[in-house]
Amino acid sequence: MQKLEGIRTLVANKTKSAAGAIASQQEWTALQGQIRSYLKALQFQDLTTFPDADIFNGSNDPFCGVPAASAGACLDQDFALHQQFHDASCRSGNWTWQTPWTDVTMLQEEVSALQAEIDAIQETLKHLGCGPGNRIVGKGPSPVCPQFMVVVQVITTTAINSAGLTERSARSLNNGQGIQVPLVLHDDGTFEGFGKGVDAGAAAGVTPGETVRSQFGHIQAVAASGSIQPGICTSQPCQPDVMHLVLVGGPSQQMTMGQARGEVNRNIQQTTATGSARLQFDLPAYIGGTAQRSLLANSLINSNMMVGLLQADNGSPALPDGSSLLFAQKQCNVR
């Protein structure tokens, strides 16, 4: 899933920028190189558990009838499902480049094959979750304690209208959904958690003689820690419970693909290192509690970071907004 979901996004973005030109072997080979670079970047950041930077255990995609090295019964079934989507184009000679087809058709076929693999793995995981020896959370005789998470979001936009240049860009975490960071809450009020997602976006610029578009993104890891200070009522009004939240985002490798059309016609692909950051927030320690911070704000760029405290879906009864995390933790310990 780690491999396939990232690669599907990469290929889908490349499909959006495809011009409908005749597909070439060089273009396909270049895409495979991009995929391997992407997987190596994930390994470099220590964000994955798979041991290689390859999709099909060393075999070329598509197989087109060439025997492939076995990766075990489970993955061999997954590989076969992917290759079914290439069967017709293999037989038609598209992959020997004897029968022309467009780059859009080629890339859409690959996206469909990747999505079929993802769907099959998701269905397999559902059955594994219900198999012998696997307990479905919330279905046992004992009450399930609520769990909580922080949702982290950063939205950055740019806008330039000056001297014949018009530019717009936007990026966000997980396509605007934010990165979920499940928390492990301890009896002393301290907590920690870890989450990761995709920080990605797109940009477009226009001058009188040139149009440039780009897509960019990287995997972003977020570590959370901190403590919850209980409120006091020795004075009025009572002071609420406060979560002191420390967020640390690790470095990554951003991939950028750009297309320039006009006086200069070229495609650009590059990988650049991103930095790390450490930020602190104080927010109400209740479900629905939020905090935000402006990272950059001027006439050209606006970047805002938001954090929110929610109940995680682990099968426990839903708590209403405003419920105290500390109180829920104490109630659970009593049970």
Image: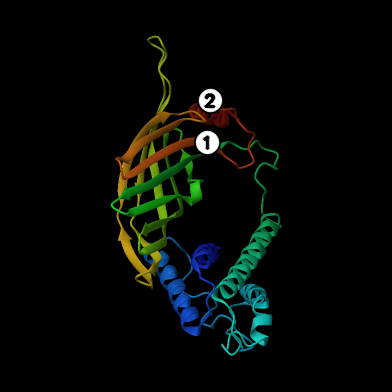
Tell me the quarter of the image containing the N terminus.
bottom right
Residue ID for mark 1: 310
- Residue at 55 percent across and 77 percent down: it is 56
Categorize mark 1 by other alpha carbons within 10 Å: few (<14), some (14-19), many (20+): many
Residue 37 lies, with reference to residue 283, above or below; the image says below
Categorize mark 2 by other alpha carbons within 10 Å: few (<14), some (14-19), many (20+): few
Q: Nearer the viewer, residue 245 or 130?
A: 245
User: SS for tag 2?
Assistant: loop
Say if residue 255 shows up in the picture.
Answer: no
* Residue type indicated by callout 2: Gly
Judged left or right of residue 321, residue 264 is left
Judged left or right of residue 298, residue 218 is right
Tell me the quarter of the image containing the C terminus.
top right
Where residue 159 sits in the image (x, y, percent)?
A: 36, 47
- Residue at 47 percent across and 30 percent down: it is 289
Residue ID for mark 2: 322
- Residue at 44 percent across and 43 percent down: it is 152
Q: Of the two numbered discs 1 and 2 on the same chain, state the one appearing first in sequence.
A: 1
User: SS for tag 1?
Assistant: strand
Residue 85 lies, with reference to residue 325, above or below; the image says below
Judged left or right of residue 168, residue 182 is right
Residue 15 lies, with reference to residue 160, above or below; the image says below
